[in-house]
Amino acid sequence: MISNIVHKSAVIKCPHCGAEYLPGEIYMPNAIIGQPDEVVKDSLGKIIYEDYSTPEREPSLTESFTCEYCDKPFVIEATVTYKTKEEAPEKTFKDQYVSLLD
Ligand SMILES: [Zn+2]
Protein backbone atom coordinates (compact mmCIF):
# COMPACT_ATOMS: atom_id res chain seq x y z
CA MET A 1 0.00 0.00 0.00
CA ILE A 2 1.46 3.28 -1.11
CA SER A 3 0.55 6.27 0.98
CA ASN A 4 1.31 9.96 0.71
CA ILE A 5 1.96 9.62 -3.01
CA VAL A 6 2.67 12.92 -4.75
CA HIS A 7 0.59 13.06 -7.90
CA LYS A 8 2.11 14.59 -11.00
CA SER A 9 -1.27 15.78 -12.23
CA ALA A 10 -4.72 16.46 -10.90
CA VAL A 11 -6.63 13.45 -9.62
CA ILE A 12 -10.17 12.78 -10.80
CA LYS A 13 -12.42 11.21 -8.17
CA CYS A 14 -15.53 9.18 -8.80
CA PRO A 15 -18.41 11.17 -7.24
CA HIS A 16 -20.07 7.92 -6.18
CA CYS A 17 -17.35 5.89 -4.47
CA GLY A 18 -14.29 8.15 -4.42
CA ALA A 19 -12.12 5.93 -6.62
CA GLU A 20 -9.26 7.93 -8.04
CA TYR A 21 -8.20 8.23 -11.67
CA LEU A 22 -5.43 10.13 -13.38
CA PRO A 23 -6.60 12.26 -16.34
CA GLY A 24 -4.60 10.04 -18.70
CA GLU A 25 -6.79 7.08 -17.72
CA ILE A 26 -9.92 8.91 -18.83
CA TYR A 27 -9.01 11.51 -21.43
CA MET A 28 -7.20 11.04 -24.69
CA PRO A 29 -4.74 13.96 -24.92
CA ASN A 30 -5.70 14.74 -28.50
CA ALA A 31 -9.36 14.87 -27.51
CA ILE A 32 -8.77 17.43 -24.79
CA ILE A 33 -6.60 19.81 -26.83
CA GLY A 34 -8.21 19.16 -30.20
CA GLN A 35 -6.60 18.54 -33.55
CA PRO A 36 -7.12 21.52 -35.84
CA ASP A 37 -6.94 20.76 -39.54
CA GLU A 38 -6.16 24.31 -40.47
CA VAL A 39 -4.87 27.32 -38.57
CA VAL A 40 -4.36 30.59 -40.40
CA LYS A 41 -2.46 33.43 -38.77
CA ASP A 42 -1.76 36.97 -39.81
CA SER A 43 1.78 38.32 -40.19
CA LEU A 44 1.95 39.06 -36.46
CA GLY A 45 1.00 35.52 -35.48
CA LYS A 46 -2.57 36.28 -34.45
CA ILE A 47 -4.94 33.45 -35.28
CA ILE A 48 -7.52 34.66 -37.78
CA TYR A 49 -9.00 31.31 -38.82
CA GLU A 50 -9.23 27.82 -37.37
CA ASP A 51 -10.92 24.78 -38.78
CA TYR A 52 -11.68 21.34 -37.43
CA SER A 53 -12.97 18.99 -40.11
CA THR A 54 -15.12 16.95 -37.72
CA PRO A 55 -16.59 17.48 -34.24
CA GLU A 56 -14.36 14.64 -33.03
CA ARG A 57 -11.33 16.79 -33.79
CA GLU A 58 -12.59 19.80 -31.82
CA PRO A 59 -11.38 20.24 -28.25
CA SER A 60 -13.69 18.27 -25.97
CA LEU A 61 -13.39 19.10 -22.28
CA THR A 62 -16.37 17.03 -21.16
CA GLU A 63 -16.08 13.28 -20.93
CA SER A 64 -18.38 10.53 -19.71
CA PHE A 65 -16.81 7.67 -17.82
CA THR A 66 -18.05 4.59 -16.03
CA CYS A 67 -16.24 3.92 -12.77
CA GLU A 68 -14.33 0.66 -12.80
CA TYR A 69 -14.93 0.15 -9.07
CA CYS A 70 -18.62 0.96 -8.54
CA ASP A 71 -19.74 0.61 -12.17
CA LYS A 72 -21.64 3.92 -12.06
CA PRO A 73 -21.28 6.56 -14.77
CA PHE A 74 -20.16 10.09 -14.14
CA VAL A 75 -19.22 13.16 -16.16
CA ILE A 76 -15.87 14.91 -15.95
CA GLU A 77 -15.42 18.46 -17.13
CA ALA A 78 -11.82 19.54 -17.55
CA THR A 79 -10.55 23.07 -17.14
CA VAL A 80 -7.48 23.66 -19.24
CA THR A 81 -5.46 26.83 -19.03
CA TYR A 82 -2.13 27.68 -20.59
CA LYS A 83 0.25 30.12 -19.01
CA THR A 84 3.21 31.60 -20.81
CA LYS A 85 6.24 33.45 -19.57
CA GLU A 86 9.52 34.57 -20.99
CA GLU A 87 12.46 32.24 -20.77
CA ALA A 88 15.05 32.97 -18.13
CA PRO A 89 17.55 35.57 -19.44
CA GLU A 90 20.37 33.05 -19.85
CA LYS A 91 18.20 31.07 -22.28
CA THR A 92 17.45 33.77 -24.82
CA PHE A 93 17.47 32.81 -28.45
CA LYS A 94 20.18 35.34 -29.25
CA ASP A 95 22.58 32.50 -28.56
CA GLN A 96 22.71 29.68 -31.02
CA TYR A 97 19.97 27.22 -30.24
CA VAL A 98 20.89 23.59 -30.52
CA SER A 99 18.24 20.92 -30.68
CA LEU A 100 19.17 17.27 -30.59
CA LEU A 101 17.00 15.00 -32.66
CA ASP A 102 16.59 11.30 -32.13
ZN1 LIG B 1 -16.98 4.76 -8.38
Image: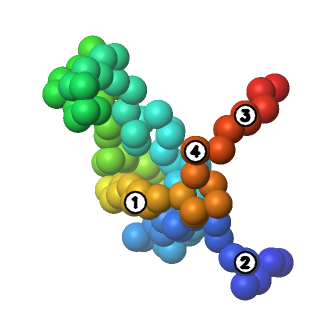
Q: Where's residue 35, x and y in %?
A: 39, 26
The C terminus sits in image quarter: top right
N-terminal of the pair, mark 3 or mark 1, is: 1
Q: Are marks 3 and 2 in contact (CB under 8 Å)?
A: no
Residue 77: quadrant of the picture: bottom left
At label 2, the amino acid type is Ile
The residue singled out by tag 3 in the image is: 99
Q: Which residue is mark 4?
A: 93
Within the image, what quadrant is residue 34 found in? top left
Q: Disc 2 versus disc 1: distance between alpha carbons?
A: 26 Å
Between residue 8 and residue 5, name the one nearer to us.
8
Instruction: Say if mark 3 contacts mark 1, CB within 8 Å.
Output: no
The quadrant holding residue 7 is bottom right
Image coords of residue 53 (percent x, y): 27, 14
Q: Nearer the viewer, residue 64 or 32?
A: 32
Question: What is the basis of the colouring in this image?
Answer: rainbow
Is label 1 in a helix, a strand or a loop? loop
Residue under label 2, please give it.
Answer: 5
Up the image or down, 18 lies above or below 89; here it is below
* Earlier sequence position, callout 2 versus callout 1: 2
